[in-house]
Amino acid sequence: MKWKLLLPVLVIVFLLGCGEQAGNTVVPQNQEQYDAGQEFVREILDSLRGSSGWTPPLPPSGGEIPRILTKEEKDRVIDIASAVPQVVEAKRNKDVVSVDTHYLWVGWIGHADGVSYLGYGAVENGTVNLSNQDDTWYPGVDFIFYSKFGKFGIAGINVAVNLETGKAVYLGGFDASEIPRKLPPQR
């Protein structure tokens, strides 16, 4: 008889425990780790201030329709993008533990703040129809900087290049960190 009364209570306790666990899966180990990771991201993104966006004069010339790049073109895109001072500076950051690169296409949509992104995989797989889009596109690279602060300190810089001139035409940044649903209590 006692078990029949206790069973609903045990089920409720179990469900509350599962909910608590699921809610905590993205909480950083401690506040310092979270703060340090976010400071790392801010440092990378602050380095882009005043120089991010499209490089004048606008509109950029030399754009094209996104297509599969040759190996030589990919190498050239990486070389040009890697030489951008903000990328060089980010690679030298003492807290960076690794850097990933991903190709993409960056589109100018007619004004200084206008930008659209197209994943290179979609172009490679032929799953994108761009015949009706007026964007001027440039090949680019996403640099993803992973810090020693784990999933709470990941920043990205994207650079688009003009293969005709050999210069970067767009510079942008993003926070790729996982933002916790809640922070642990302050101690």
Image (cartoon, rainbow, N blue to C red):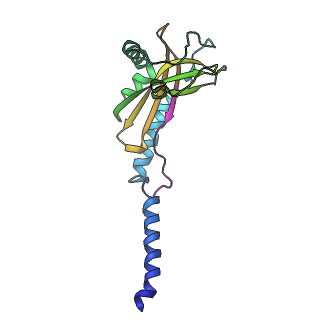
Q: Measuring from the top left, give residue 179's x and y in whole percent.
A: 49, 47
Q: In this view, does 68 lie above or below 8?
A: above
Q: Closer to the camera, 61 or 99?
A: 61
In the picture, which quadrant includes the N terminus? Answer: bottom left
Q: Residue furthest bottom?
A: 1
Q: Does the magenta stretch include residue 183?
A: yes
Image: magenta residue range: 172-187
Snapshot quadrant of residue 151? top left
Residue 9 higher or lower than 19, as above or below: below
Secondary structure mainly formed by the magenta segment: loop
> What percent of the width, then of the height, locates residue 132?
64, 21
How many numbered callouts? 0
Magenta includes 106?
no
52 relative position to 72: left or right: right
Q: Can residue 187 be seen in this view?
A: no
- Compared to residue 135, the image places residue 42 above or below, namely below
Residue 101 % position (x, y): 39, 27
Q: In the image shown, does 114 or 5 lie closer to the viewer? A: 5
Q: Which residue is drawn at 37% across and 38% down?
A: 147
Residue under the point 36% across and 27% down: 92
Identity of the residue drawn at 45% across and 18% down? 68
In this view, which residue lies farthest toward the left?
97
Q: Going by the picture, which residue comes out furthest to the top?
A: 165
Q: Which of 138 and 37 is in front in this view?
A: 138
Q: Can residue 165 be seen in this view?
A: yes
> Residue 29 placed where, x, y %?
38, 53
Task: Report which quarter residue 187 is drawn in.
Answer: bottom left
